[in-house]
Amino acid sequence: MILIVDDSPENIISLKKVLEKNDFEVDTASSGEEALKKILKKSYVLIILDVQMPEMDGFEVAEAISGYSKAKETAIIFLSAATADVKLITRGYSSGALDYISKPVDMNILLLKVKTFYRIYEQSRALNEMQKKLLEEIEFRKEAERKKDEFISIASHELKTPMTSVKGYIQLLERSLDKGDTETVRTRLRKVQNHIEKLNILIADLLDISKIESGKLKFNKKYFSFEELLFHLLEVLQQANPDIKLHHRGFVESEVFGDEMRLEQVIVNFITNAIKYAPDANEIVVTAEVRGDELYFAVRDYGIGMAEEHQQKIFDKFYRVEETSERFQGLGIGLHICQEIIARHSGRIGVHSTVGEGSEFYFYIPLHAKLSETTIIL
């Protein structure tokens, strides 16, 4: 938008008419004070400013504008009588003007200058936008690099810990075998198996994240009994965690279209996370039911919970809640993999949580296949 500032109504009308005829949006002010009030409320690309006005002249207006951060980059063209001397013109430039036009105004020259300033403005805006995007990209890459380095460090530690334990237990097993202590051998073998299973889960997650990055995570979708899958998983997880009561609510009577193995992966992740992050609780509520034409599944724990700021990022790759990262082990990729799995089922995933009261992780997926889906999806 262009602002014309002139105490002469005739000048304003003629300038406004010519500019609007050439498709420029125009605003007007008949005094310096009125112009400043408008500049405080609106943004202008160009100000055409008369030098000789009563009370507050054009120079004073320009100097006031230069001190206002929102408008200091706005281009100013001064209008002055043809008799203006060099000192007057010099003062105009030092006040912030970028150009000068003498009265009576040659409309053709004015239009050329206005078009030039608009072109410069558009180029400057495009350049600023490009610079902004470039800075955002730089910050994004720096943050991604930081997360990658942190992930490598965490992954190394997470893999090293069970490996060290396995190595230690094998050494102890050798001693127990030499002594013929069968019961101790069995106990230590179970511990070795537990640590190997941890390693297996870590490696599987690393492979999955690699497949997600390369677009090669495979899905084998078909109709299956979600209720049977859930019943089996709850039975196994309950046996593995006898101190935690797993409550099952709801019932899914119809079959669900999806990748049974991948959805099992999400369910196990939700429940094991609930157990991990609720160390002082003794119950977890698992809900599965049909809502409309969707399957709803949720796991509610009564653990440490998390703040709103973390709920917005918890499904991001490599994200770990700082307050719990030292206390609870993990790579920060399990929930990101779950998000990808649910997204590939055309579903949605989320969390409700309150600090100190626990969390509820949930997902929705369509019950039935889309017409475009085939039995095997790569």
Image (cartoon, rainbow, N blue to C red):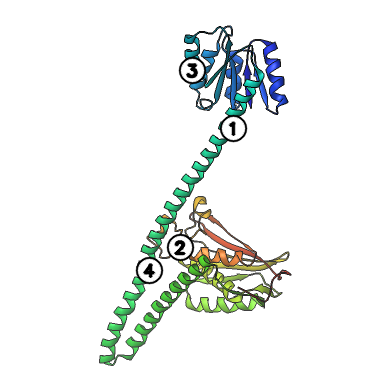
Residue 286's disc is none
Residue 332's disc is 2
Give me the C-alpha separation between circle 1 and circle 3: 21 Å
Quarter containing the C terminus: bottom right
Image position of 105 (left or right of 124): right
Give me the C-alpha separation between circle 4 and circle 3: 66 Å
- Nearest to N terminus: mark 1 or mark 2: 1
Q: Which residue is under mark 3?
A: 93
Residue type (three-letter) at the residue carrying disc 1: Arg
Give me the C-alpha separation between circle 1 and circle 4: 57 Å
- Is there CB contact under 8 Å for labels 2 and 3? no
Give me the C-alpha separation between circle 2 and circle 3: 59 Å
Quarter containing the N terminus: top right
Where residue 49 sits, quadrant-wise, is: top right
Task: Please tell me which residue is depicted at 40% across the width and 62% down the height of the picture.
Answer: 151
Q: Which residue is under mark 4?
A: 158
In the image, 192 versus 118, the foreground residue is: 118
Residue type (three-letter) at the residue carrying disc 4: Glu
Give me the C-alpha separation between circle 4 and circle 2: 11 Å
Q: Secondary structure at mark 1?
A: helix
Q: Is residue 135 above or below residue 329?
A: above
